[in-house]
Image: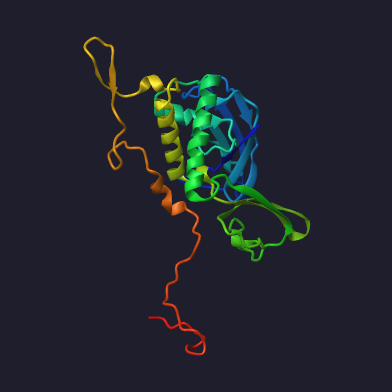
Amino acid sequence: MSAFDFQPMYGGAHYDPEPAGGQVTRLDLYATPDRSGTAVATAGPAARLGAGKYRFVLPDVPPGRYWATATFTPTEGAQPVTDASLRLDLPNGLGLVTSPEAVADELGVPLPLTPEQRTALETAIRKAQADVVGYLHRPVVPRIVTLRAVTPIWAGDLSDPEAWPLPDQDDQVAVLAYRAQAGGTYDVDFLVGLNGSAEESIVRYVTTHAAESERERPGGVGAAGRRVSSVSAEGQSLSYETAPAAGQAGAPPTIDSLSGLRRRLYAPQSHPARAPWPYSSGRYRRF
């Protein structure tokens, strides 16, 4: 069973229907982009995770790509609004920052995928993802930390992690969901760590390099789609084009494009070293 987190859009902006008496009512999955005919599956109503964030629990469906419509009422008594811009690659929640369907798109492999193709592409994704983890010195799949029956530090934006008495974390922290309990307390779920699937640079790197590794692997998915530059007169030999060089249009991203997400192992000092006591004061002098 998979879950899909939905942020309603209304009037060209992110919108939260529940405080105005509205509700996120249903999600319909279709097998084709035109979203016509009978829905493959339906889920809803969605549970509110926090301000403007709602979660659908999806029924079990065959793995693959689905096109979806989400329906919600913006305010109490208003006409339902339908968002027909959603596309889901299921199942999700497998610890992958991208999907086999996304890699297949990169390779030009038509959908749906066979089970063998899906397994091969998932393996290629995990290999590319492992390279990213090794370079960044940190996981790219976050973990969930839950605090139960806690009181917010202030009555402000409860989606702000600093509003909660969470022990110091040497990592990124985001509020995933909060649920009101008796006595004015809350149960709060935090997402701790780097969420690679939400970082476009990581998703692009893993998708592109998983595709290239399969393209170059003998017998790999999409290997027949390698770039042919020339064929001998007798047709007995082929020459293949290499990928564009780094910096050229269409070139795969390099691993150092992710340098801004690396875990820092030290903090550089912004002031010169001072002499030991008693030859210096107890304070730093700024220059």
**Residue drawn at x 50%, y 24% as measured from the top left:** 35
**Residue drawn at x 47%, y 89% as measured from the top left:** 279
Q: Is 161 placed above or below 284 here?
A: above
**Left or right: residue 285 compared with residue 192:** left
Residue 236, percent from left and from top = 28, 12
The residue lying toward the viewer, choosing from 13 and 192, is 192
Q: Is 12 placed above or below 173 here?
A: above
Residue 213, percent from left and from top = 43, 30
Q: Is 272 placed above or below 173 here?
A: below
The residue lying toward the viewer, choosing from 54 and 66, is 66
**Residue drawn at x 64%, y 64% as measured from the top left:** 155
Q: Would you identify the image quadrant in which residue 170 lies?
A: bottom right
Residue 250, percent from left and from top = 31, 36
Q: Would you identify the image quadrant in which residue 109 lies?
A: top left
Does residue 171 appear in the picture of this structure?
yes
Q: Residue placed farthest to the top in the image?
A: 234
Does residue 83 appear in the picture of this structure?
no
Task: Locate the N terminus by quadrant.
Answer: top right
**Residue drawn at x 43%, y 25% as measured from the top left:** 217
The residue lying toward the viewer, choosing from 135 and 92, is 135
Q: Residue placed farthest to the bottom in the image?
A: 278
